[in-house]
Amino acid sequence: MNSDEMKVFFALLRSAIEGNKLNSEELSDYSDNLLADMIKLSVKHDISQILALGLKQNDLLSSENKQIENYIIKAVFRYERIRCDYENLCNVLERANISFLPLKGSVIRKYYPEPWMRTSCDIDILVREEDSEKAKSILVDDNGYSFKGKGSHDLSFFTPSNIHVELHYDLVEDGRVNQCTKILKNIWDNVVIRNDCEHWCEMTDEMFYFYHIAHMAKHFEDGGCGIRPLIDLWILDKIDGVDVNKRNELLEKGGLLKFADCARKLSKVWFRNEEHDLVTKQMEDYILRGGVYGNSENRIMVHQQKKGGRFKYALSKIFIPYNVIKFHYPILQKHRWLTPFMQVRRWCKIIFCGHLKRTTKELQYNSNITNEDAVKMQKFLNDIGL
């Protein structure tokens, strides 16, 4: 889609969220020929239900494409399944006297006009590390959850109705950018107890805003964050009565203010018809081609520059530094001397567990990145503060 067609796409998303209709200029730029590309892009970024609502509100669904409304029905069903298990999980933790803090979509969707408009694939909740095993026991033994494994910073479960739950016990993980760690490690000092509860916690506004930007930046560096976090950001920036200075002070401390400013500018380009500059255009192209979870080409381009060039990137695929590999093998956090053995274990996993083809492809792509593209990416990362 060209720039005018992209404007119509984002105008339809804005229309769905704000409840207003497209203006005459936007309507004149719309045609049924755009529909297939718009649907494809919305599905790629998991926002098809918002686009469908925008089309419906502007009477752009004919009898031939009425089935597009199914995206709304599916989103409502998906939300209701998650909502039921989310509320049950929160009640279980509250009764067990375990302090917990809901994260991500479970929190942000309350700011949307309808909560089903903000989809998510799982439930993310933070507990204190010392409570994680107690929580695991209660969920598995008393509530029928199936335990799927322990990661570097979370425990993975499925509810009896097959909803994925990530029970985080640490927000400091591999991939956190800039100075995020020093902010996120103090997360429990920046929460308040929810009304009528004793253990259900909520982040302060500025901390939740910081966490959203940090999470977005992490995925951005890893290949792309998708359109949805920019919609979230636009909605968070519209909340009345917030202290913008507090938000920006925390972002400054975490080294993310520049990135946040660029993301805020892009959200205004998309949803307030502000003009692109070179950086927002690059940001848009990077996000749109990456999809909701990013892609490997974006990730390799970024990581090559973060590592210091082709050779250092290739070396990093062979020898992962301790401050990264310790998150892949948590035992190293207590027994650092095992690092060489975990390096060998990782090589064996690459060779014998089906990862060799992917790793070889990544190294080939790394070697084929031109010097011109590498310089452009390095400048882009500097421009957005990453």
Image: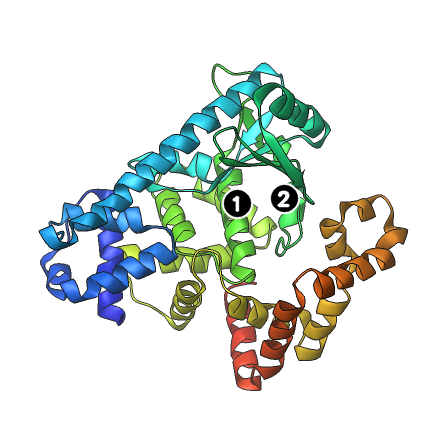
Residue 63 pos. (x, y %): 10, 51
Q: Residue at x 28, y 62 (%)?
A: 274
Q: Residue at x 42, y 38 (%)?
A: 108
Q: Is residue 261 visible?
A: yes
* Quadrant of the drawing holding the C terminus: bottom right
Q: Are marks 2 and 1 in contact (CB under 8 Å)?
A: yes
Q: Is residue 141 above or below residue 106?
A: above
Q: How is the image coloured?
A: rainbow
User: In this view of the protein, which residue sits in the foreground, 344 or 16?
Assistant: 344
User: In this view of the protein, which residue sits in the foreground, 263 or 110?
Assistant: 110
Q: Residue at x 33, y 60 (%)?
A: 41
Earlier sequence position, callout 2 versus callout 1 = 2
Q: Is residue 30 left or right of residue 84?
A: left
Element on which disc 1 rests: helix
Q: Residue at x 73, y 28 (%)?
A: 130
Identified by mark 1, the residue type is Phe
Residue 183: give its label. Answer: 2
Q: Is residue 182 above or below residue 274?
A: above
| Residue 313 quadrant | bottom right
Residue 380: give its label. Answer: none
Residue 231 pos. (x, y %): 36, 50
Classed neighbour count for the residue bearing mark 2: other residues with Cα under 10 Å, few (<14), some (14–19), many (≥20): many
Element on which disc 2 rests: helix
Residue 210: give its label. Answer: 1
